[in-house]
Amino acid sequence: MKLKVIDVNLSTGGSAIAIINENDAKKLGIHASDRILIRRLRTGKAAIAVADISSEHIHLGEIGLFEEPLKLLGVEKGVHVDVMPCERPRSIQYISAKLEGKELSKNQIYEIVTDIVENHLSEVEMTYFVAACYSNRLSIKETVYLTNAIVDTGTRININKKVILDKHCVGGVPNNRTTLIVVPILAAMGYTMPKTSSRSITSPAGTADTMEVIAPVSLSLEKIKEVLAKANACMVWGGGNMNLAAADDKLIRIRHPMSIDPEGMLLASIMAKKKAVGATHCLIDIPYGYMAKFPTKQAASSLAAKFVKLGRMLGMKVKVVMTDGSQPIGNGIGPALEAYDVVNVLKGEGPNDLREKSIFLASEMLGMVGEKNARQKVLEVLDSGKAYAKFRKIAVAQGGRKHIKLPKARYFFDVLSEKQGTVKQINNKVIARIASLAGAPEDKAAGIYLRVHCGGKVRKESVLFTIHSQSKLKLDTARQIASEFGPITIK
């Protein structure tokens, strides 16, 4: 059936959707959520879309296309296309099998991931896949298949080096911005580290958000290779035009609103990004403790063993460290404030907890490749200024300014201690929420700057933390939550 294209000016951000008139749908014998094959008459280019049925907005003889199929077909409104029914992808059967608790084969998982990347599955169908992996856990074999499928259907960074280093933190702790310190330390020692990082999903800042205050992070594959040739390392966003682990980005979008994180998907998500950059040695940081993602060392240990096993099956050397996640690491929480901490540590200053953790992680990574006296070597590179010089070289290579200038907020508010005593607890989740309400990470200068840490002594009416915001309204909202929930416990 030939239909005229209408641009509905809508986007799903993933799945291809087409709307057809209900009478045309009857003639074609299709129903809502059925697949249709749309073929451009002039070029023969085709795309598969999920059908939606309309009785009002799309007239007889028309087809309303979302931005995704418009882009896939390269058509504009008014162009005629040929439309016919299309069978449902076989991958839906495999998703149903996983929902029933069956183990999937390598080919079945590859087909599911391919259909995700090519937008052949709707968001509802991808949601069922996430739910199936959550209720019927992926085996280690399935996790390996999923990891490799994500890598093979995305972009790879091919670097001709015998040793390629990478690191990852599973998150859950505000600031903890060690990557931006560890990468230049190791790069200054001659090691290659193509670090791709995420933007914030629920936190006040991701590593990419913080680096973006100093230099562009949305780089093409060609530009990344150019940066690596100049500086031995990069610190970039793994999404966007890079298409690194594209299927994983789509699955993360599904997982986030439901707040579920199937363990097999978590493992595959992290390790796929490491394999895609060619990492030979990878350090995984799992913080645990009060209000961290993993409350106990036992919970962290269980995941740690699976990371090591998965790494071995993928041909990668993986080491896991379990660290204190019971309070924020560093003082700044929010892109610019975290960048401020990073620059200070690289200049040989504080915050001391961020400095010490970065030294520890860098030393552990050197130990993985057989370096002796690792801590001593890290200290020499950090305290001599070589790491800071390398950081600036990486930033400039990525398109940043030669002289680092961080944005500052317009409004500030000091939250004071109501009594004298010792800081017993800092609630990571409440601290992160206050920083987010202040405007982070969208407003780069917004967030919180901590003045205390656990174990520290405070006087009555001394400053516990300062809220930074670009908006008076957002500042007032953040102040209210700080007053209501009191993230810092003093006894």
Image (cartoon, rainbow, N blue to C red):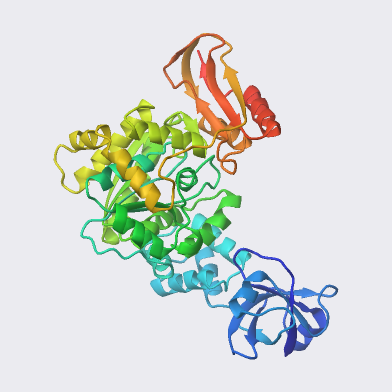
Q: Is residue 241 positioned above or below 468 on the image?
A: below
Q: Is residue 376 left or right of residue 419?
A: left
Q: Is residue 473 left or right of residue 172?
A: right
Quarter the N terminus occupies:
bottom right
Front-lying residue, 405 or 14: 405
Q: Is residue 374 positioned above or below 11 on the image?
A: above
Front-lying residue, 272 or 379: 379
The residue shown at (59%, 37%) is 436
Q: Is residue 143 positioned above or below 211 on the image?
A: below
Q: Quadrant of residue 345?
A: top left
Q: Is residue 192 visible?
A: yes
Q: Is residue 3 left or right of residue 271?
A: right
The residue shown at (58%, 70%) is 121
Residue 160 pos. (x, y %): 24, 64
Residue 63 pos. (x, y %): 74, 80
The residue shown at (47%, 42%) is 210
Residue 28 pos. (x, y %): 73, 87
Q: Is residue 484 left or right of residue 229?
A: right
Q: Is residue 28 positioned above or below 413 on the image?
A: below
Q: Which residue in the rendered view is the most extreme toward the right?
A: 56
Q: Which residue in the rendered view is the most extreme toward the front?
A: 402
